[in-house]
Amino acid sequence: MAVACSVVSTLVCFHAHPDDEAIATGGTMALASAAGHRVVLIVATDGELGFTVEGEAETPEALGAFRRAETQAAASILGAHRVEFLGYHDSGMAGESSNDDPACFAQADVDEAAERVAAILREERADVFTIYDDHGGYGHPDHIAVHTVGTRAGELAEVPSVVWATMNRDKIREQMAGAADLMSELGDATSDDPPKMDEEMGSPEALITHGVDVTSVVGAKRRAMVAHRSQIGDDSWFLKLPDDIFAVAFGHEWFVDPANPRPADSPMIAHLL
């Protein structure tokens, strides 16, 4: 049951593709909604260059519509009050020819795209706006565009707090150290392997200002991920994790407030709102 709060704030989360919201900020969105705050999701693309679905969404156009529906379902689970799609084409992974498509998000005019986002921020009177870190978490062109466009949109709308959703690079190293043994224990019935650690993935812990404990709503986060079944199937390593291990891997969400760096001797802030 949602708990009413004395001061209602508005959290707006800006993401590149369907399923990014569940993985990166799903817990934070669920916590905010449960506390009585307004939660708004903006998605730049339909993610039509993701995995097609045999018999249901075998073309990029069909997959885009399919993934929009998945996002609406996931957003409902997370308690989002509004979902907006900007409708740009998926740029694909870095280095692919799709990066050069004039209609893709990576090629969008920054000011034009930012004004579209800023219009939503103004309408919603956003208090906190989440984008990605300055390298898009792992270098995806659309994620980098979310950072660039989102930064400008926050300026145009004069949002009080613009924070970067990121990954805790140091925690990932710790967790991935034992990943091979864990997956061996889980068996071979996974459709994919855990992501390899990249030196540029996420941000070092020293730069992270906010560590939000979302273990109380990690079940909702997991259900939101399940809603994106075209990209995160039942046999995905994400969902093969036992509940307790899943809570360790996905029970915290990490943010950087570039305007207010964290002193070395200070703890992380535990909430965004």
Image: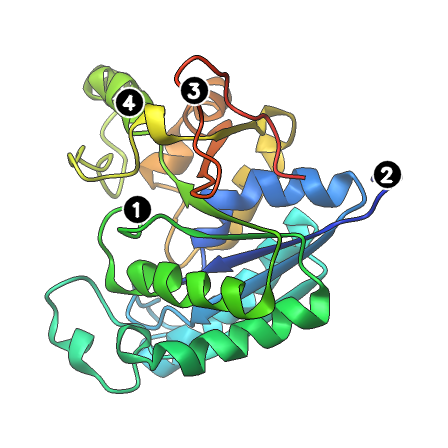
How dense is the environment of label 1, judged by Cα within 10 Å: few (below 14), some, or many (20 and up)?
Answer: many
| Residue picked out by circle 4 | 170
Element under disc 4: helix
Do the residues under discs 2 and 4 have CB atoms within 8 angstroms? no
Name the residue rendered at 39%, 17% in the picture.
264
Sequence-first disc among 2 and 4: 2
Figure disc tally = 4
Residue that label 2 marks? 5
248 relative position to 236: left or right: right
- In the foreground, 40 or 72: 40
Specify few, some or many for label 4: CA neighbours under 10 Å numbering under 14, 14-19, or 20 or more: some
Q: Earlier in the sequence, mark 2 or mark 1?
A: 2
Residue 23: tell me if it is visible: no
Label 3 crowding class (10 Å Cα cut-off): few <14, some 14-19, many 20+?
A: few
Secondary structure beneath dot 2 equals loop
Give how far apart the Cα atoms at labels 3 and 4 are: 17 Å
The amino acid sitting under disc 3 is: Ile
